[in-house]
């Protein structure tokens, strides 16, 4: 196992491997009042450590706390806690057995640039408009990808031989965000990403955020099926799908790497409407109506009307699920949309106060269920957050109960820190695809728990999560481009593909890798590592490693939320 770990590490870092740098910490630094934890690999006896300043003067000494064997990382670890050091400064280092950590700062405001860059990711991912050098620099400027995108519906046989009838219309779906490293644009996944940005805005307005969010919201509105449209699905009678939302618009076939979006040669198609996409539209459009009320009343009214049409369409067609049998784009299949119904009802109730939505909220099994970290296939927690934090017509006793449910979830996440040596609020036997976003979505709930209670341990849990993402992990890797001593360099992306074409750029700062994935290692790079890496080490910075190193809008959204929250 140790040999396999070192081999995987060498793949990631080359000469600058953590074998020569065993002290793992947040590589950008710490706010003065925050917890300050580092991890060092070591044996059974507590290791002595020294904290020195930029002049090499000793600031503090101590002994590490032994955790011992750690299944998640595959090593034996100890924890160094120097939280009581609060003096601002540059060039701090930890020294352990003669090995020195990366230099770091202690300073207020260290997360403001990260929040700014994490939000800028969404501008970089825009479709249909040029990405301008004056906003992003000449390196990342490019012509518009898929301008004037008027798409027709997929018709014909899918990969499983199922015949799809198509539709009698085309939609102008220009704009929106590319979902990930490919050029697909998805209503499911666009929904949770947009909600997360708007939730951050509802908590604390951020300059420029509404302009970016409106760009995606306009795309989601454009994906709504015209009223009165009837179609026959591959099985069953003809049905009224007016008001539903198409699942996605994407290429007919997968494109090769690299492939700047303006060079994409594939035919662009609308793929069939689904209940999940329709409810994502209902939820985000209802949230939009609330957020833009008093800012742009016409847009708010347009969003509310679309949300209510989508809700009624989903009620008429509650079980139209996504087909995963189309090539050229991700499926985002989901066979249980009860959580999306709850989420959409919660947003509509918070916005309109309507009795129908209240009944749907209070009658849902998700109304009183324990909360978990949200994700695109599990959105009930989003609805609970809205009901707990946005003004609405629920009785105070129910709102208080939902706020306690957020705190209870945060307590469970903090308890998970005891189950892994790196002390993060996430413990899993295996790490899933996009594990970094799972951790950051937990951090979002921890942040809300701090907002509700003011208890400092919840902020400490948020810091633990961001520390892991920025270097306090067994690879000593910052999973965010442009941040830390060893930042993300080669994400799976068709434009940020410098390793494949020197004329193309690497990623701009503030882009989050999906992170370790030990459960669905489906690309060729990951397949070669299967069974040879502990869960937290199943990652490599390789453009071809899409199951470990892709980027996505629903991953960068919680990165922004957490960075903005820490900065506030």
Image (spheres, rainbow, N blue to C red):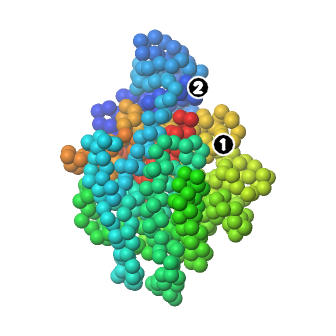
Q: CA distance from mark 2 to mark 1?
A: 18 Å
Q: Residue at x 40, y 26 (%)?
A: 102
Q: Which one is in front, 215 or 420?
A: 215
Q: Which residue is mark 2?
A: 33
User: Is 566 left or right of 4, judged from the image as shown?
Assistant: right
Q: Image quarter for residue 117?
A: top left
- Is residue 463 shown above or below 61? below
Query: Where the N terminus falls, by quadrant?
Result: top left
Dot 2 or dot 1, earlier in sequence: 2
User: Is 182 left or right of 464, judged from the image as shown?
Assistant: left
User: Is 42 left or right of 133, judged from the image as shown?
Assistant: right
Q: Residue at x 51, y 88 (%)?
A: 237
> Can the viewer see residue 462?
yes
Provide the secondary structure element on which disc 1 rests: helix
- Is residue 109 shown above or below 145? above
Provide the secondary structure element on which disc 2 rests: loop
Residue 227 in picture, x, y percent from top left: 50, 78
User: Is 242 left or right of 355, judged from the image as shown?
Assistant: left
Q: Residue at x 49, y 17 (%)?
A: 50
> Can the viewer see residue 45?
no
Residue 399 in picture, x, y percent from top left: 74, 52
Residue 163 in picture, x, y percent from top left: 39, 84
Q: How many marks?
A: 2
Label 2–label 1 contact, CB within 8 A: no
Q: Which residue is mark 1?
A: 449
- Badge number at residue 118: none
Residue 505 in picture, x, y percent from top left: 26, 45
Q: Residue at x 57, y 28 (%)?
A: 34
Q: Which one is in front, 269 or 494?
A: 269
């Amino acid at each position: 196992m140790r040999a396999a770990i070192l081999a995987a590490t060498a793949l990631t870092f080359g000469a600058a491997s953590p074998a020569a740098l065993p002290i793992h910490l947040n590589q950008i630094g710490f706010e003065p009042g925050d917890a300050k934890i580092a991890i060092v690999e070591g044996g059974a006896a507590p290791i002595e450590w020294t904290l020195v300043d930029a002049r090499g003067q000793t600031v503090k000494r101590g002994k590490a706390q032994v955790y011992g064997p750690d299944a998640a990382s595959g090593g034996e670890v100890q924890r160094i806690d120097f939280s009581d050091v609060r003096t601002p400064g540059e060039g701090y280092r930890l020294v352990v057995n003669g090995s020195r950590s990366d230099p770091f700062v202690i300073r207020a405001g260290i997360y403001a640039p990260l929040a700014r860059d994490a939000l800028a990711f969404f501008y970089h991912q825009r479709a249909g408009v040029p990405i301008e050098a004056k906003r992003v620099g000449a390196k990342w400027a490019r012509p518009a990808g898929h301008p004037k995108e008027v798409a027709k519906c997929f018709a014909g046989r899918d990969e499983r031989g199922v015949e799809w009838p198509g539709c009698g219309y085309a939609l102008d779906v220009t704009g929106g965000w590319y979902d990930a490293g490919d050029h697909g644009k998805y209503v499911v996944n666009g929904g949770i990403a947009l909600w997360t940005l708007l939730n951050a805005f509802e908590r604390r307005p951020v300059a420029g955020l509404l302009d970016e969010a409106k760009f995606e919201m306009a795309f989601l509105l454009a994906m709504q099926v015209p009223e009165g449209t009837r179609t026959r699905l591959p099985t069953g009678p003809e049905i009224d799908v007016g008001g539903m939302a198409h699942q996605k618009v994407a290429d007919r076939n997968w494109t090769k790497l690299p492939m700047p979006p303006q060079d994409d040669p594939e035919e662009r198609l609308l793929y069939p409407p689904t209940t999940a996409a329709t409810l994502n539209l209902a939820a985000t459009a209802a949230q939009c109506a609330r957020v833009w009320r008093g800012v742009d009343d016409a847009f708010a009214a347009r969003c509310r009307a679309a949300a209510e049409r989508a809700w009624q369409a989903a009620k008429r067609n509650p079980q139209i699920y996504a087909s995963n049998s189309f090539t050229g784009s991700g499926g985002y299949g989901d066979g249980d949309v009860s959580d999306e119904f709850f989420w959409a009802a919660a947003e509509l109730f918070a916005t309109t106060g309507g009795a129908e939505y209240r009944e749907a909220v209070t009658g849902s099994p998700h109304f009183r269920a324990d909360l978990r970290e949200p994700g695109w296939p599990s959105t009930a927690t989003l609805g609970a957050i809205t009901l707990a934090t946005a003004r609405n017509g629920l009785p105070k006793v129910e709102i208080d109960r939902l706020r306690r449910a957020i705190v209870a979830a945060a307590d469970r996440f903090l308890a998970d820190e005891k189950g892994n040596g790196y002390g993060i609020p996430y413990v899993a036997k295996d790490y899933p695809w996009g594990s970094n976003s799972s951790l950051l979505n937990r951090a979002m709930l921890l942040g809300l728990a701090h907002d509700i209670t003011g208890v400092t341990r919840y902020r400490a849990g948020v810091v633990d999560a961001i520390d892991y993402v920025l270097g306090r992990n067994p690879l000593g890797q910052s999973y965010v481009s442009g941040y830390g001593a060893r930042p993300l360099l080669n994400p799976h992306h068709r434009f940020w593909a410098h390793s494949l074409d020197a004329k193309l750029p690497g990623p701009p700062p503030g882009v989050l890798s999906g992170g370790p994935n030990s459960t669905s290692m489906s690309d060729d790079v990951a397949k070669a590592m299967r069974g040879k890496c502990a869960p937290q080490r199943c990652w490599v910075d390789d453009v071809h490693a899409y199951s470990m190193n892709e980027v996505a809008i629903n991953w960068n959204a919680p990165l922004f939320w957490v960075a903005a929250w820490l900065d506030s």
